[in-house]
Image (spheres, grey):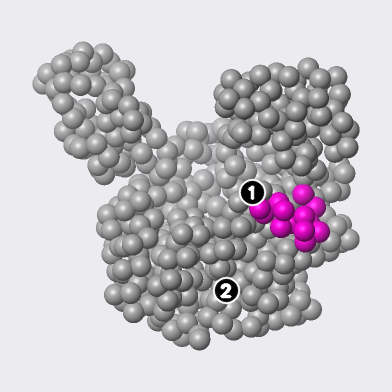
């Protein structure tokens, strides 16, 4: 049964993206909003809108009973969760299914399985997808040396019962391991009352590479890879399609591994498999799967021409995939930068202003996904993402040039944005060369590469 | 008598975490720079400090309340 009335349980730029895609498919759109979001763009664009609760997310966008009630009251037949909020909540997906509505995403069971680190790792291994080599579960100090020899140094020693980085140590060789493992054990005992250890290969300075997949529950395809190594506080700030560091053979096996896992779990909808890539060893390791549309999906759309949001709505409405793998071709290179309402010169302090002027970046191969309008008060209650500037060109070099032009032509008055960060990155020789990894951006910022004067000059 | 105002729009909290007591109680001495609350703005927590000294009279808004920039958060005697 094709979807006829789609309820959008999200906000911001992704709500705008989903409303537009659904309307283009002839679907009636119902936009959920909190009391603080009555003025947002998706509310104005949707066919109808409904308030689901007060400003705090826990009372509105995370409030499962309120969302289900609103969806039923507006006679929705499907719910699109966007990203963040309830998009990866098995409880929400299950509640939607039980209410007789379509959840635009995979089944609750798939979300649950892929959201559990151990279960996801097992599913990946079963599908032949490489994972970071590690001990099979908990080990004792006495076993550490033999296990480390098998998986290769450097190794990371973690508390089996731990989390949040506590008790993590890196040993470069056997001598270090013999010193550090007992320390890790003692610390784990003190912190968690459990001295069990877990060790895995430490991938130092990896790149973050991910593969976009689409599935209809029976078959699955990939839409190639993205590289998202430029991160601050584990948040991606700049994303590219494709990953220039990969040779064709590696790219092919990476993408094939993603499809194998998607097929193995009968994946439905759009999803992303995230990998760490060890450039020196030319090896990639699966780390996790995101069972939803992602912020950076437009770069994939730019290079493949596939409308990922429309496709996920169609397959979740029961259609078969509208394309085969052979039909998905990649042309050129695309880059996306995230514009956040933050002051990059003041340690990225949030800056929720009123948009006084808005001049969108335009041009051939330039796309601007956002939810702004002149006079709009950016609400302080949610995350700071305002939108994304996406560019597409024949080569990576040309894409960076186009990004600079796009950012220069854009004007967002009345609020601070992270645009100066992207201008400085685009001017950096290492970024131009593509010579970076996930541990690159923070030291670059700490070294003062983004000072107020440099930003002004850029 | 004087007011402490919110430096930013956001959600104002009296306590460092839900399980802990408020930063200040009525009658407490307040020195310049003392933290009296937290503002959550765009998922970031920012300390609200006193820019004047005095005796804490009370919070002007409830815990976990949305506030605008410039809103009175607390009063001092």
- Quadrant where the N terminus of chain B is found in the figure: top left
Image quarter of residue A155 = top right
Q: Look at mark 1 in the image and give the residue it sits on.
A: A117
Which chain letter matches label 1? A
- Quadrant where the C terminus of chain B is found in the figure: top left
Any part of residue A212 in sight? yes
The foreground one among A245 and A326 is A326
The residue range painted magenta reads: A119-131
A132 over A53 or under it: above or below: above
Instruction: Please report the residue visible at 62 percent of the width from the left and 27 percent of the height from the top.
Output: A194
In the rendered image, residue B42, in percent from the top left (x then y), is placed at 40, 44
Instruction: Please report the residue visible at 43 percent of the width from the left and 71 percent of the height from the top.
Output: A98
The foreground one among A337 and A407 is A337
The foreground one among A315 and A198 is A198
Q: Look at mark 2 in the image and give the residue it sits on.
A: A312
Question: What is the spatial separation of the Cα atoms under label 2 and label 1, in whole angstroms?
Answer: 24 Å
The majority secondary structure of the magenta stretch comes to helix
Instruction: Please report the residue visible at 66 percent of the width from the left and 71 percent of the height from the top.
Output: A266
A2 over A145 or under it: above or below: below
Q: Does the magenta-highlighted stretch encompass residue A339? A: no
Label 1 element class:
helix
In the rendered image, residue A113, in percent from the top left (x then y), is placed at 61, 58
Q: For this view, does A295 lie left or right of residue A218?
A: left
In the rendered image, residue A109, in percent from the top left (x then y), is placed at 57, 63
Image quarter of residue B76 = top left
Q: How crowded is mark 2: few (under 14 residues within 10 Å), some or many (20 or more)?
A: many
Instruction: Please report the residue visible at 48 percent of the width from the left and 48 percent of the height from the top.
Output: A340
In the rendered image, residue A96, in percent from the top left (x then y), is placed at 43, 69
């Amino acid at each position: 049964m094709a979807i006829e009335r789609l309820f959008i349980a999200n906000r911001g730029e992704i709500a705008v993206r989903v409303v537009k895609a659904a309307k283009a498919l002839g679907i009636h759109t119902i936009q959920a909003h909190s009391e603080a979001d009555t003025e947002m763009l998706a509310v104005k664009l949707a066919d109808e809108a409904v308030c689901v609760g007060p400003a705090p997310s826990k009372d509105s966008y995370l409030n499962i009973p309120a969302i289900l009630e609103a969806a039923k009251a507006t006679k929705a037949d499907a719910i699109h969760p966007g990203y963040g909020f309830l998009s990866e909540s098995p409880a929400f997906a299950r509640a939607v299914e039980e209410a007789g509505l379509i959840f635009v995403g995979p089944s609750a069971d798939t979300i649950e399985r892929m959201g559990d680190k151990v279960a996801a790792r097992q599913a990946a291994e079963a599908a032949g997808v490489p994972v970071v080599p590690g001990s099979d579960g908990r080990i004792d100090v006495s076993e550490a040396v033999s296990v480390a020899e098998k998986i290769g140094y450097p190794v990371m020693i973690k508390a089996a019962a731990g989390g949040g980085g506590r008790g993590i140590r890196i040993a470069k060789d056997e001598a270090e391991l013999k010193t550090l493992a007992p320390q890790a054990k003692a610390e784990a005992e003190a912190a968690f009352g459990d001295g069990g250890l877990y060790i895995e290969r430490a991938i130092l300075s990896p790149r973050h590479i991910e593969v976009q997949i689409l599935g209809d529950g029976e078959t699955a395809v990939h839409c190639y890879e993205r590289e998202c190594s430029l991160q601050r506080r584990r948040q991606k700030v700049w994303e590219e399609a494709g990953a220039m560091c990969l040779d064709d053979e590696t790219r092919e096996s990476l993408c094939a591994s993603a499809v194998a896992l998607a097929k193995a779990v009968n994946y439905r909808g759009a999803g992303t498999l995230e990998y760490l890539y060890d450039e020196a060893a030319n090896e990639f390791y699966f780390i996790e799967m995101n069972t939803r549309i992602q912020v950076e999906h437009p770069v994939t759309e730019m290079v493949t021409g596939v409308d990922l949001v429309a496709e996920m709505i169609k397959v979740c409405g029961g259609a078969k995939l509208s394309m085969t793998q052979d039909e998905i071709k990649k042309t050129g290179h695309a880059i996306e930068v995230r514009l956040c309402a933050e002051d990059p010169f003041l340690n990225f302090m949030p800056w929720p202003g009123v948009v006084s002027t808005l001049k969108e970046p335009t041009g051939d191969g330039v796309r601007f996904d956002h939810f702004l309008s002149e006079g709009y008060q950016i609400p302080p209650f949610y995350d700071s993402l305002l939108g994304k500037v996406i560019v597409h060109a024949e080569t990576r070099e040309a894409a960076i040039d186009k990004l600079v032009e796009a950012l220069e032509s854009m004007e967002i008055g009345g609020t601070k944005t992270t645009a100066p960060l992207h201008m400085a990155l685009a001017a950096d020789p290492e970024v131009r060369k593509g010579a970076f990894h996930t541990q690159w951006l923070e030291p670059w910022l700490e070294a003062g590469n983004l000072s107020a004067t440099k930003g002004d000059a850029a | 008598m004087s007011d402490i105002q919110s430096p930013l729009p956001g959600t104002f909290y009296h306590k460092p975490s839900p399980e802990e007591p408020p930063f200040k109680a009525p009658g407490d001495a307040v020195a310049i720079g003392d933290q009296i609350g937290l503002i959550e703005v765009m998922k970031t927590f920012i300390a609200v400090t006193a820019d004047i000294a005095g005796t804490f009279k009370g919070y002007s808004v409830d815990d976990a309340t949305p506030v605008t920039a410039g809103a009175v958060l607390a009063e001092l005697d």
